[in-house]
Image (cartoon, helix red, strand yellow):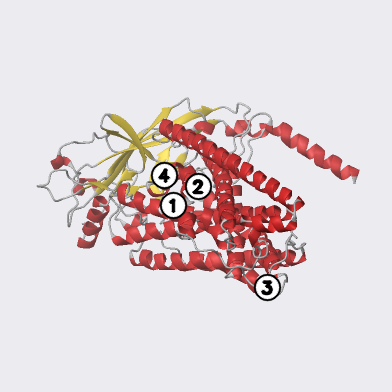
Amino acid sequence: MQSIYKWIFLFGFLLFFHGCCGFYLPGSYMRTYSTSDEIYAKVNSLTSIETELPFSYYSLPYCRPQDGIKKSAENLGELLMGDQIDNSPYRFHMNMNESVYLCTTKGLNENEVKLLNQRTRDLYQVNMILDNLPAMRYVNQNGATVQWTGFPVGYAPTDKNRNEDYIINHLRFRVLIHEYEGSGVEIIGTGEEGMGVISEADKKKASGFEIVGFEVYPCSIKYDPDKMSKLKMYDRIDPVNCPSELNKLQVIREQERVTFTYEVEFVKSQIRWPSRWDAYLKMEGARVHWFSILNSLMVIFFLAGIVFVIFLRTVRRDLTRYEELDKEAQAQMNEELSGWKLVVGDVFREPECSKLLCVMIGDGVQILGMAAVTIVFAALGFMSPASRGMLLTGMIILYLFLGIAAGYAGVRMWRTIKGTSEGWRSLSWSIACFFPGIVFIILSALNFLLWGSKSTGAIPISLYFILFSLWFCISVPLTLLGGFLGTRSEAIQYPVRTNQIPREIPARKYPSWLLVLGAGTLPFGTLFIELFFILSSIWLGRFYYVFGFLLIVLSMLIVVCAEVSLVLTYMHLCVEDWRWWWKAFYASGSVALYVFLYSINYLVFDLKSLSGPVSAIVYLGYSLIIAVAIMLSTGTVGFLTSFYFVHYLFSSVKID
């Protein structure tokens, strides 16, 4: 046994020593190229912030590869996000500047013209990828340089007298390269090419040029189709200058033949390969983002501190007072008893819809665990944007395997409430089906709309079967296993007995649910600034990579949800309202209502350009899924905190 520990220690030491030379975690395996090596660019789905409906690149009349269209291997997350990565005819030779002819199309028919005009007016972007780097475009807006990924399908004229649009048919690529000479830096990659390490033995093989930047400058040029069609694909042409006159641009018109060309320039850069994603991860308004988050955290800390101090003093005073009363005459004590001690015989009475409550608690534990582990790994750099779809794939895998925690939490709470394990199988099945069922219903409804629009955002039938198989073969058995473990765990014993006849709850001037709904504003205050950046990254195509801040916000959200629910539970008990179970859940879970309302506000004021009812319905559908997940996770935090608080409170006083 000791020899095994020695070998484990030795392996760990060697692994640590091996990585001490310096390593790079986020990203993909570094690839170097020699001069004149062929490099092919790939194309992703066409995207637009106007419609949020992705479409295939080859749904438009673009040039196709000589060997046919071949789809790249895509992970689960990429498929769910609507990515469709294909090969393209754009071929470069490392460190060789060239101007190349691609193809000349046949005369555009009516459908192609209509589709090109629609994609142009909807501001669709062409997304190209070279060595796992998205194409970046720099645009001058109001005197400032703004960076975007991708380039537009075409230009719509600003002159109202002109109704014709112009297609982008010439691309100027600027590829930034860094000469790599095997400098002893150990590279560990976790990207789409898999994990790998450049060792000492591979230094000579790794020497060459590495791609550290990919920029594109699109323009429209009207060529002579008869002259250009005599050329073959990849024939060299003379460099061209992008015209500014409208009569020299390629118009989108029926029977018009479009010629596609490109030129590439390789520029040596001092940017090293581990830093090549820095240009993509620069967020607009970074200073406002950081100071806003810091200010929000300070305010929340201050409010939470005040609530916590007041709460501690109040409870301590009540406990001291009741302890003293117990020592006095019994008659005097009974006369002066008031508040939460009067509901001692009802505080642990079974709530309404107790099975549903246990199901939501189980799913809440599962979602919260998934979110926490994902954000921790992302903050440590394991969820790099260079690895497309890894974040969503990781979340799904974590959710599946955390079914064991969901089954355990739900069944143990069921056993506590009912006092028996009877019915735990039915409860475990309900836990396994509740949240996935909601997601399935919403996604199926959205999928019919996306199928009708012929969008690549629609989930293929094959992917439905894959997701169903993963759920049925992993999540369901683990949930049942967790439920079985919940039946074998020690039951939580109530410190007091429950009366047979329920106590009458005194009438109140205002409904208690109004206070419960209002309680969600404080947790929402910790979340709404970060929520803006998350929504912008999802719907405006921006990269989100400040997971360290998101981890802090998640921690603060959990603390505030726990405190808010705890304080409201105490307030309800003080007015002799013993029906605290669901109110404790929704006191913190009501933050989801404000998240959904904020999503609607974001749709109205920040996504003004979103066109069409399909786009709005898709946006609201995904926002509803997010809101339900937030309600279950935050509600679970509030309920469990309140439950253990009530249990501690009534076990800390002497009850006669």
Q: Label 4: state its secondary structure.
A: helix
Asked whether the residues under the numbered discs 4 and 3 touch, taking CB atoms below 8 Å apart as contact, a structural biologist would say no
188 with respect to 244 (left or right): right
Question: Within 10 angstroms of label 2, few (less than 14), some, or many (20 or more) residues?
Answer: many
In primary-sequence order, the first of circles 1 and 2 is 2
| Crowding at mark 4 (Cα within 10 Å: few <14, some 14-19, many 20+) | some
- Asked if residue 381 can be seen in this view, the reply is no
Secondary structure under the numbered disc 1 in the rendered image = helix
- Mark 3–mark 2 CB contact (< 8 Å): no
Q: Secondary structure at mark 2?
A: helix
Q: Position of residue 569 (x, y in %)?
A: 58, 55
The label shown at residue 532 is: 4
Disc 4 residue type (three-letter) = Phe
Question: Badge 3 local density, few (<14 within 10 Å), some, or many (20+)?
Answer: few
Residue 148: give x, y in percent of width and height.
Answer: 36, 39
Residue corresponding to mark 3:
500
